[in-house]
Amino acid sequence: MYFYCEACKKEYPLNSHFYRCECGGMLSLHKDPDDVLASGITLGEVETPLLPFQVDQLDFLLKLENLQPTGSFKDRGAYTLINELHHLGIKEVALDSSGNAGASMAAYAAAAGMKCTVYVPDDISQEKVAQIEAYGAKIVKVANGRMKACAAVKQNLGKAYYASHVYNPLFFEGIKSMAYEMYHQLHEHVPDYIFVPVGNGTLLLGLFLGFWEIGRLPQFVAVQSDKCAPVYEAFHDLPKGPRRSTIAEAIRISEPKRMDDILRVLKLSHGDAITVADKDILKAHKYLGHHGVYVEMTSAAALAGAAQYFKDGKPDNYKVVIPLTGNGLKR
């Protein structure tokens, strides 16, 4: 296995401290069929249920990723990345996060006996700070938003390995497992639609890789807040709008680093990109809670998007999956 540049095809070993090619291109993972990723460090990961759920006569399937060990889908990527880094002898990692990835990486790093530093925007919820610190990780708060945290960690890596859920292809390799689970749970069928809350696109890209290996793609619909919607604007060739705060803070990413990959996935899957208003996210969040499902606001954004997209109805036989990305206790 090795990383290679999507632009110039230059190769890098997995333990390289280059998180991006010298030419500026993003890295992908080359893995032969007989290559096996490291394992052994576990926090009790589970196959998360697909819960039938109805909204205004619309039937959906909720993928309950809020039930993972640290309460978010990011545990899938952290499991794969930390196991492989531990196998390679990496002792110290650093990353930037709006919260969920930081918690996942901190937890698995703790289980592996690795030192972990997480750079976060200074307006991160206290619940997420408390969770990250509970795993023994160091928190560095950075003013002026998520993208500043990304810049700060790169400038201060030192000897630490940049364990980025955005740049590192091993993280996407872990997210792929969700696609295989859905395929298994649907009796070897692929969903017709998957509504994915998109910030940096980690979930979207990982699911795409999984279904690409399976051999058939669902139609992916990227859901963004109307207060910060760079993917929606790029997909529909719209002028750049303002980048404002939203209650769906996990997808408040003004400049996704893998924008080209995100757009390619949406086009290859004959998908779409939509936006939802904060008031509709709040409505969806309340609806979920009143039906026994407590998730963070970003998860509710995906449900709001699906309800909006199919407001005029959908064929009964369509299997529409909505991954619930994080537990409500994270806010």
Image (spheres, rainbow, N blue to C red):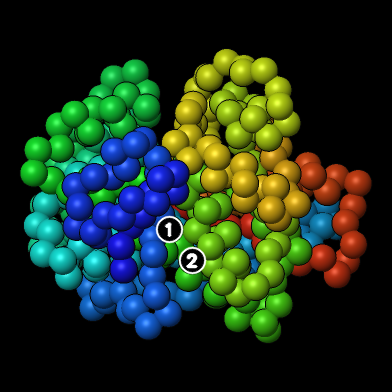
One can see residue 293 in this view: no
For label 2, the SS is helix
Quadrant (top left/top right/bottom left/bottom right) for the C terminus: top left
One can see residue 243 in this view: yes
Q: Which mark is residue 239?
A: none
Q: Position of residue 63 (x, y in %)?
A: 58, 64
Q: Is residue 125 above or below residue 192?
A: above
Which residue is found at the position 39% from the left and 75% from the top? 32
Q: Which residue is mark 2?
A: 176
- Number of numbered discs overlaid on the protein picture: 2
Pick the front one: 241 or 74: 241
Which residue is found at the position 73% from the left and 31% from the top? 236
Q: Is residue 197 above or below residue 124?
A: below
Q: Position of residue 221 (x, y in %)?
A: 69, 48
Alpha-carbon span between mark 2 and mark 1: 6 Å
Q: Which mark is residue 172?
A: 1
Which residue is found at the position 69% from the left and 69% from the top? 216
Q: Residues within 10 Å of mark 2 (few under 14, many from 20)?
A: many
